C-alpha cells in the first residue's frame, strides 16, 4: 500500500507508477533508511510517543531487517514498492504489525530521504577519501623507486625541459591533495542532520534534534526546515569534487597513454590493466587508462544534470528532486573505481629509464640552460634567447644536440661562449639547476617525497559507529598497560558522539573523547595512538582538534594530566597544581592502576581569560 493512498479513490496508472517509483535506484539507501529509523524510534521514545517496550521491539525488528537487506540487497530493488521508505515500513509491519505505523509519527519522507541521502553520501565520500590516500601512497612509492630517472617535460606536447620522473609523480600527489581537501570540506558541510524537519515546516513533537543528529554521527542539526528538506547543495558539491578529481585522473591517464605508446616507449603497463586486439595479435592496449579518460564524461554529465535540475526549483520539496540520486549513485562509484584502477596501473608500472633519458637529451631540452649560461656571461636574457635560437637552428641543420656542437660553432654565433658551456649543457646539470622550492632538482624532489610521506594521510574527524571496534581496541590496549582507564564497548557506542579519531591511509589509528559533565565541566579521556603505526603527529593533531572543539563549546581552561609534559609544553601548556583539578575529575583517579603511585604532571592551557570550566586530559605519547 502506498504511504499516501488515503487521499485518492483509485490507484495510480501502471505507466505512471513505473515512471514515479524510485525503488529501482534508491534501494541503495536501505541501510541508511533503517539506521535513520532506529534513531527516530529512539527520539520518539524520548518524547513518550513510544514506550520502552515498543521502542525495543521496533529496534529489534529494524536490526533484523537490516541483516536481511545486507544478505540480498538487490532483491529490495525488484520488490515492487514505490520507494525505499515504503519498502522498510511494509517489511516492518510484517514483523511487528500496527506498531510499525507509529514510527512515522512526526516525520515526512522529505526529511527522511534528505537524511538517508546525506548518510549515504557521507559514507561514500569517506570511502573515496581512503582510496585517494592509497593512490597518493602509490604515486609516492613510484616516485621513491624512480628517484633519479630523467624524463622529458612537455609543453604543447613538445619536449621542453628535462624533469625527474619522480617530479611528474609528485605533481599528481599535489592534485590529489587538493581533491582530498575539497572532499573534506564537502563532507563537513553535508554532515548536518535534517531529520525532524518534517515535510517543510518542522515537527510538532519536542524532539531533541541535536541529540538525534549526534546519534547519527552528524555534527549538528540543520537550522531551517524549509532549506533542510530541499537542500541538495551537498550533491552538487560532491559532483563538483568528483568532476575536478576526474579531470586529474583523466590527465594522468592521457600522460601514461602517451608514455606507453610505441612512439614514446617510456613505460610498460602491466598485463593486468591492458588488453589485446581481436585482429592484431601484437597489440597491447591501455584499456584501463582509456576507460578512466572515457568515464570522466559520465561524471561531468551527472554534475551538469544536477545543476540543471535544481536551477529553478521553488521551495520546498519538489518531485524533480527525485532526479538527485541516480547521477550521484553512478558518479561516486565511477569515481571510486577510477581511483582504484589508476592505482592498479601505477602498481604494475615499469619505466624504461634509458628511453626516457634518451628522449630528454633530444629536442634541445637544454636550450634554456644555455640561455641562462649567457645571462651569467652578462648578456641580457632577451638577447641570449635570440642567440640560443640561432644555435638551435645550427644544431638542427647538423642533426646534432646542442652539447654535441664543437666550440667553434658556438663561437661563430656568440664569442662569449667558452669551453665551460659543456658542463652546463649536461642533462644532470639541467636537473640540478632547478633548486628553488617546487623545482625538479634531486634535493627538492626528495624533500617533496619526504614531506608527502610525513603528511601521509593523518585525518582527524569525529567518530562514527563504524569506528567502535577500532576505538575499543585502542582503549583496551592502553588500559592494559596502565596508561588509560578501561571502558566498556557499550559505553563507547552510547558516547560515540564524544569521540574523535585519527586515520592513516583510511585506518583508524588514534582516538580521544571529550566528556562533558552535568556542571559543564569537560574532560578529554581515552586518548591513545596505535603504537604499531609509525606516522608521527597524530597525538598533536588530536589535541589540536579537541582544543578547537573545546573552544567552540565555550570551554575556557584546558587541564592535562600527563607523563610527557615536554610534548604539551610545545603545544603551549604550562604547569599547574593537581589541587586545582575539580573533585569529579579526581574521582576517576580511583579507577587508575597507578593511583597510589601517580607520576602524572598537571598542566593547563587557557582558551580565554575565564577559568570557571575545566578539561583534564590523560595523554598517551
Image (tube, rainbow, N blue to C red):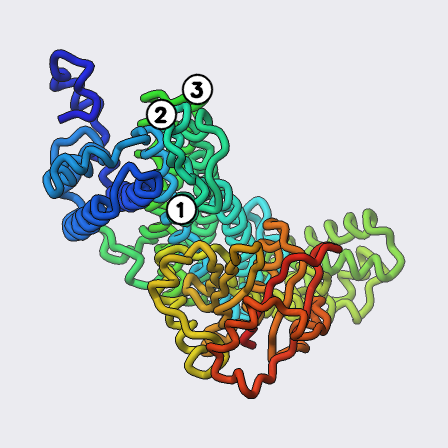
User: Horizontally, is 49 left or right of 357 in the view?
Assistant: left
Which residue is depicted at the point 56% across and 88% down? Answer: 597
User: Horizontally, is 519 left or right of 444 in the view?
Assistant: left
Q: Earlier in the sequence, mark 2 or mark 1?
A: 1
User: Horizontally, is 282 left or right of 216 in the view?
Assistant: left
Q: Is residue 499 above or below residue 252?
A: below
- Disc 3 packing (10 Å; few <14; some 14–19; many ≥20): few
Q: Nearer the viewer, residue 17 or 327?
A: 17
Image spot of residue 500 (x, y percent): 49, 59
Count numbered badges in the picture. 3
Q: Earlier in the sequence, mark 1 or mark 3?
A: 1
Q: Is residue 81 above or below residue 219?
A: above
> Could one spot residue 404 in this view of the protein?
no
Provide the secondary structure element on which disc 1 rests: helix
> Could one spot residue 221 in this view of the protein?
yes
The residue pinned by badge 2 equals 199
Image spot of residue 422 (x, y percent): 73, 69
* Spatial CA span between label 2 and label 3: 11 Å
Image spot of residue 180 (x, y percent): 50, 51
Residue 315 is marked as 3
The residue pinned by badge 1 equals 122
Q: Residue furthest bottom?
A: 597
Asked whether disc 1 touches disc 3, contact meaning CB atoms under 8 Å apart, the reply is no
Q: Residue furthest top?
A: 9
Q: Residue furthest front?
A: 583
User: Horizontally, is 349 left or right of 548 in the view?
Assistant: left
Q: Point out the image quarter for the C terminus.
A: bottom right
* Spatial CA span between label 1 and label 3: 24 Å
Amino acid at each position: 500500500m502506498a504511504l499516501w493512498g488515503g487521499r485518492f479513490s483509485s490507484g495510480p496508472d501502471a505507466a505512471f507508477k513505473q515512471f514515479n517509483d524510485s525503488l529501482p535506484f534508491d534501494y541503495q539507501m536501505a541501510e541508511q533508511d533503517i539506521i535513520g529509523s532506529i534513531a527516530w524510534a529512539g527520539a520518539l521514545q524520548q518524547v513518550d510517543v513510544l514506550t520502552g517496550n515498543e521502542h525495543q521491539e521496533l529496534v529489534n525488528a529494524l536490526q533484523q531487517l537490516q541483516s536481511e537487506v545486507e544478505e540480498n540487497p538487490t532483491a529490495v530493488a525488484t520488490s515492487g514498492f514505490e520507494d525505499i521508505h515504503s519498502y522498510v515500513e511494509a517489511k516492518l509491519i510484517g514483523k511487528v504489525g500496527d506498531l510499525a505505523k507509529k514510527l512515522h509519527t512526526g516525520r515526512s519522507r522529505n526529511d527522511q530521504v534528505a537524511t538517508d541521502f546525506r548518510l549515504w553520501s557521507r559514507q561514500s565520500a569517506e570511502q573515496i577519501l581512503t582510496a585517494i590516500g592509497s593512490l597518493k601512497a602509490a604515486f609516492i612509492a613510484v616516485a621513491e623507486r624512480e628517484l633519479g630517472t630523467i624524463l622529458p617535460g612537455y609543453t604543447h606536447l613538445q619536449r621542453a625541459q628535462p624533469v625527474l620522473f619522480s617530479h611528474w609523480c609528485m605533481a599528481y600527489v599535489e592534485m590529489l591533495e587538493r581533491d582530498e581537501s575539497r572532499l573534506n570540506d564537502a563532507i563537513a558541510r553535508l554532515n548536518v542532520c535534517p531529520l525532524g524537519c518534517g515535510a517543510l515546516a518542522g515537527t510538532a513533537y519536542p524532539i531533541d534534534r541535536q541529540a538525534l543528529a549526534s546519534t547519527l554521527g552528524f555534527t549538528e542539526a540543520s537550522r531551517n526546515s524549509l532549506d533542510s528538506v530541499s537542500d541538495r547543495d551537498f550533491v552538487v558539491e560532491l559532483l563538483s569534487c568528483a568532476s575536478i578529481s576526474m579531470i586529474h585522473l583523466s590527465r594522468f591517464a592521457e600522460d601514461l597513454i602517451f608514455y606507453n605508446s610505441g612512439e614514446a616507449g617510456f613505460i610498460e603497463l602491466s598485463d593486468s590493466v591492458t588488453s589485446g586486439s581481436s585482429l592484431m595479435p601484437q597489440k597491447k592496449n591501455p584499456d584501463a587508462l582509456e576507460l578512466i579518460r572515457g568515464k570522466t564524461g559520465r561524471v561531468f554529465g551527472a554534475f551538469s544534470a544536477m545543476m540543471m535540475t535544481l536551477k529553478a526549483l521553488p521551495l520546498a520539496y519538489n518531485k524533480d528532486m527525485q532526479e538527485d540520486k541516480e547521477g550521484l549513485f553512478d558518479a561516486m562509484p565511477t569515481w571510486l573505481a577510477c581511483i582504484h584502477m589508476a592505482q592498479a596501473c601505477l602498481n604494475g608500472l615499469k619505466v624504461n629509464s634509458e628511453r626516457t633519458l634518451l628522449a630528454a637529451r633530444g629536442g634541445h631540452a637544454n636550450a634554456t640552460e644555455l640561455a641562462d649560461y649567457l645571462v651569467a656571461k652578462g648578456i641580457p636574457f632577451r638577447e641570449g634567447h635570440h642567440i640560443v635560437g640561432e644555435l638551435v637552428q645550427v644544431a638542427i641543420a647538423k642533426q646534432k644536440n646542442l652539447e654535441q656542437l664543437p666550440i667553434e660553432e658556438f663561437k661563430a654565433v656568440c664569442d662569449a661562449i667558452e669551453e665551460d658551456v659543456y658542463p652546463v649543457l649536461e642533462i644532470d646539470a639541467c636537473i640540478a639547476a632547478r633548486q628553488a622550492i617546487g623545482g625538479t632538482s634531486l634535493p627538492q624532489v626528495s624533500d617533496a617525497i619526504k614531506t608527502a610521506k610525513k603528511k601521509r594521510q593523518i585525518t582527524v574527524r569525529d567518530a562514527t559507529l563504524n569506528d567502535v571496534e577500532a576505538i575499543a581496541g585502542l582503549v583496551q590496549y592502553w588500559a592494559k598497560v596502565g596508561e588509560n582507564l578501561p571502558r566498556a564497548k557499550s559505553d563507547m557506542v552510547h558516547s560515540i558522539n564524544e569521540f574523535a579519531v585519527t586515520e592513516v591511509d583510511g585506518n583508524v589509528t588514534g582516538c580521544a573523547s571529550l566528556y562533558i559533565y552535568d556542571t559543564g565541566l569537560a574532560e578529554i579521556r581515552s586518548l591513545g595512538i596505535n603504537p604499531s603505526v609509525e606516522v608521527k603527529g597524530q597525538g598533536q593533531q588530536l589535541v589540536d582538534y579537541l582544543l578547537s572543539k573545546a573552544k567552540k563549546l565555550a570551554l575556557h581552561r584546558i587541564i592535562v594530566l600527563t607523563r610527557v609534559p615536554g610534548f604539551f609544553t610545545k603545544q603551549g601548556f604550562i604547569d599547574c597544581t593537581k589541587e586545582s583539578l575539580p573533585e569529579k575529575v579526581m574521582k576517576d583517579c580511583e579507577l587508575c592502576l597507578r593511583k597510589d603511585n601517580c607520576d602524572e604532571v598537571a598542566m593547563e592551557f587557557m582558551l580565554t581569560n575565564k577559568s570557571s570550566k575545566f578539561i583534564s586530559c590523560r595523554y598517551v605519547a
